Image: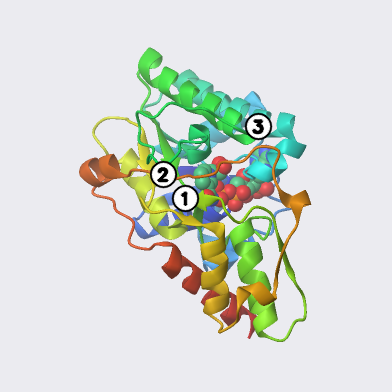
Amino acid sequence: MKKALICGVSGQDGAYLAKLLLNEGYSVCGTSRDAQMSSFQNLVRLGIRDQVKLESAALTDFRSVLQVLKKNQPDEVYNLAGQSSVGLSFEQPVETLESISIGTLNLLEAIRFTGEPIKFYNAGSSECFGDIGTEAADETTPFRPRSPYAVAKSAAFWQVANYREAYGLFACSGILFNHESPLRPQRFVTQKIVAAVSRIAQGSQEKLYLGNVDIKRDWGWAPEYVEAMYKILQQEEPDDYVIATGESYTLEEFVVAAFDSVGLDWQDYVITDRSLFRPTDLAISRGNPAKAKEKLGWQAQYKMPDIVRMMVQAKQDSAQ
Ligand code: NDP
């Protein structure tokens, strides 16, 4: 039986990935900064809480990382842990940089230290590309990060590439564009919109306050994106891949689709709040997943309108 270690198993992607790996017959261990305190609600929601072995690990602490590797002896390690909000990274730049960059470096070093042929997946981000204009970003597009989060993810990306080249580690980055699901925390704007729409549809008198709704994003469906992570580690050679739908929509289009799905006019409820604008933001974000299609046989089935419909439906089901 293959063994996988998922760092950040309590998050959206960690939970879906754990489910996928269990279905593939893996024994799955997952880490949280404090496994005693975490409720692992996402694992509970997916009905797999009891099937995942849970460990505490602080990725910024080398001893902790080495210990969890030695104890569990995984064949594959998926690093999904770290401060994951672009908005929050402007408020907590040091925490963001340390949790993402030092965390990734400690994992790479610990894998190298053990000398075991452990395959390593790192959660890269489309935020690294920065403003790319109307071109779709692929694996050759240069990084121009525009937030502390993106700077940290860029550093981690190059650490992974360097350990692959310098020490021959089977280390890969998935450069994932935004992906959503009912497990997305409400701190993220898509879930904030879906939750507000759902409450308004049930009679709430509230308004929905949003920042810049002109930004364009390439939104995908998280359960599909974790399949790409898994496939990346099943290849003969380690490599980096852009994972995206290839289609981008404005946030306004997302909002319109969400209100439309419950038969309401968004303009009656949405208020622009300039305090929610970020110091720097990306105008357009769109990926070119051609390499993933060719090499991994992976392609996104769900696009923004499907994702809105599924998220609103899930929210309404959970409210009943
Ligand atoms: P989540 O925020 O849902 O999960 C990340 C996990 O990391 C949390 O469950 C938490 O686990 C841990 N974590 C949070 N903050 C910190 C911190 N300051 N220091 C250390 N650990 C922390 O993220 P997702 O599942 O959405 O994303 C998974 C990974 O993919 C992340 O690295 C994210 O940046 C990246 N990514 C996500 C995209 C998306 O659209 N979802 C797009 C591109 C990249 P605990 O509290 O249990 O320790």
Query: Is residue 26 at all visible to an observer of this figure?
Result: no
Q: How far apart are marks 3 and 2 (CA)?
A: 33 Å
* Disc 1 target residue: 28
Identify residue type, mark 1. Val
Q: Residue 112 carries which label?
A: none
Dot placed on the residue nearer the N-terminal end, 1 or 3 = 1
The kind of secondary structure element at disc 1 is strand
Viewed as shown, does residue 252 lie left or right of 76?
right
The kind of secondary structure element at disc 3 is helix
Identify residue type, mark 3. Pro
Residue density around tag 1, few if under 14, some if 14–19, many if 20 or more, within 10 Å: many
Query: Is residue 296 at all visible to an observer of this figure?
Result: yes
Q: Distance between the residues labelled 1 and 3?
A: 31 Å
Viewed as shown, does residue 127 lie left or right of 169?
right
Q: Residue 148 carries which label?
A: 3
* Disc 2 target residue: 3
Q: Residue furthest left?
A: 294
* Residue 52: % across, % down: 52, 55
Q: Nearer the viewer, mark 1 or mark 3?
A: 3
Residue 312 sits above or below residue 41 on the image: below
Residue density around tag 3, few if under 14, some if 14–19, many if 20 or more, within 10 Å: many
